[in-house]
Image: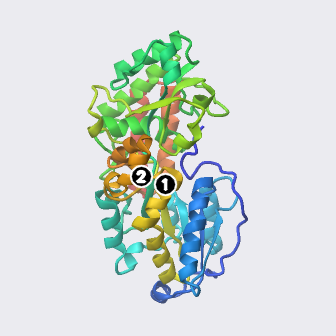
């Protein structure tokens, strides 16, 4: 249903090739940091991102004949994470990958596959000046940046206006859990859609980023799943969020059955939990509206936090010409190129005050303006070791209790929290 998370199984073009700038290892890191010459980069297979990437590379190459960039879509594999991990192991990763999932950074860092961007004299200042306070979420546990915060897709609630109208709803009340449940019941009772909302019920670790985590970010005012070396999700707030979703499943307002396709586009569900990348997908197919994710008591939209669904840029240690790679990274994330990326994809650059910086774009494309506002209040997955195992541990407990009702929700979260805390201690 969603082109979520760079860790999804992907069907991509290209093949895993050794990069002309790589060789078998990083060589002398200091020398590599200053070295300039040809480099290779990978980007997502998303059509709009490919188009942006091609123009970015062409613009760079036109001015740097001696530092040519060769670009391709990330090679085919079970998941982008596995493809990148394999390339790190083989020593032939490209210099830059514009599709690095924050959840995989700790693993790639542990493999020795990433370059600390702080190693460049202006690395730390460039990242923090561009992204502002949100950059702090992307620091690794050693205090360094192994990823450049690039772009986000703040998750919100899309609703189908025609389905709601069929249920007699013109102005949807979705701000509190009680309102959301009442509205959902009206929609289903009117047979305006089979279910009110259809988050993926499958057990992959990243699925919690599109049901539990956005609402948890909103309910807590911006907490991550792990803070200060300890899990946070078994709190009262976490149990309220899980309890809300349990009611949605228990009352058949959401479905535990896997759906092939896009339930929102197909009209099977009246709502979807998704970010602005989907606007282009819904064009001409769904007459939609959008609201922030709900909270138990209701909060003003200006106070709602949500999951970022970010993809970042990593520089990989097989790169010999890191001086060029750093220059290309800054060029690709400049104000001008970020503006072109926004125009091409509708995704939000992770930079300070996007709405004001690109005011002309949002004036011409008002559908995206609410996402620019929401982009200033996003929560990332915690940058910790064992990140994927931690998320899978949480998802296992969530699936068993919330989706399938096989265990008490509170007990499930408490048990998962104990396991996660042990994983954090082991890291």
Query: Residue 73 lies in what quarter of the image?
Result: bottom right
- Residue placed most toward the observer, 287 or 95: 287
Tell me if mark 2 has few (under 14), some (14-19) or many (20+) residues whose alpha carbon lies within 10 angstroms of its own.
some
Rendering coords of residue 267 (x, y %):
60, 24
Image mark for residue 361:
2
Above-or-below relation of 89 to 407:
below
Rendering coords of residue 293 (x, y %):
38, 33
Rendering coords of residue 284 (x, y %):
59, 34
Is 24 placed left or right of 350 in the picture? right
Q: Residue at x 31, y 34 (%)?
A: 219
Query: Residue 145 lies in what quarter of the image?
Result: bottom left
Q: Is mark 1 on a helix, strand or loop?
A: helix
Image mark for residue 343:
1
Q: Which residue is drawn at 64% across and 30% down?
A: 259
- Residue placed most toward the observer, 44 or 357: 357
Image mark for residue 352:
none
């Amino acid at each position: 249903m969603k082109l979520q998370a760079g860790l999804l199984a992907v069907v991509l073009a290209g093949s895993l090739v050794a990069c002309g700038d790589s060789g078998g290892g990083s060589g002398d890191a200091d020398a590599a940091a200053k070295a300039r010459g040809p480099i290779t980069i990978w980007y997502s297979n998303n059509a709009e991102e490919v188009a942006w990437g091609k123009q970015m590379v062409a613009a760079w190459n036109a001015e740097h004949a001696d530092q040519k960039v060769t670009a391709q879509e990330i090679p085919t594999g079970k998941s982008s994470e596995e493809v990148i991990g394999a390339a790190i192991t083989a020593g032939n990763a490209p210099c830059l990958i514009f599709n690095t999932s924050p959840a995989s950074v700790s693993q790639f860092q542990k493999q020795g596959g990433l370059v600390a961007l702080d190693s460049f004299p202006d690395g730390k200042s460039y990242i923090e000046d561009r992204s502002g306070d949100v950059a702090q979420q992307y620091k690794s546990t050693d205090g360094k940046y192994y990823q450049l915060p690039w772009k986000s897709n703040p998750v919100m609630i899309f609703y189908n206006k025609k389905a709601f109208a069929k249920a007699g709803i013109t102005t949807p009340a979705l701000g509190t859990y009680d309102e959301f449940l009442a509205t959902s019941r009206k929609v289903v009772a009117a047979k305006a859609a089979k279910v009110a909302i259809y988050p993926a019920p499958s057990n992959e670790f990243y699925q919690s980023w599109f049901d539990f985590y956005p609402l948890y970010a909103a309910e807590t005012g911006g907490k991550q799943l792990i803070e200060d070396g300890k899990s946070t999700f078994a709190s009262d707030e976490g149990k309220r969020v899980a309890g809300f979703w349990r009611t949605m499943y228990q009352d058949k307002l959401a479905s535990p059955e896997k759906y092939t396709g896009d339930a929102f586009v197909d009209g099977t569900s009246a709502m979807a939990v998704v970010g602005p990348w989907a606007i282009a997908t819904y064009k001409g197919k769904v007459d939609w509206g959008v609201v922030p994710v709900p909270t138990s008591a209701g909060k003003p939209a200006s106070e709602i936090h949500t999951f970022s669904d970010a993809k970042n840029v990593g520089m990989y240690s097989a790169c010999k010409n890191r001086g060029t790679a750093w220059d290309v990274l800054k060029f690709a994330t400049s104000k001008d190129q970020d503006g072109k990326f926004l125009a091409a994809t509708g995704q939000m650059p992770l930079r300070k005050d996007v709405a004001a910086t690109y005011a002309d774009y949002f004036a011409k494309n008002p559908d995206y303006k609410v996402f620019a506002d929401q982009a200033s209040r996003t929560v990332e997955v915690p940058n910790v070791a064992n990140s994927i195992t931690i998320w899978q541990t949480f998802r296992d407990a969530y699936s068993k209790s919330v989706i399938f009702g096989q265990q008490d929700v509170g007990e499930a979260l408490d048990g998962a929290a104990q396991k996660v805390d042990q994983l954090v201690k082991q890291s």
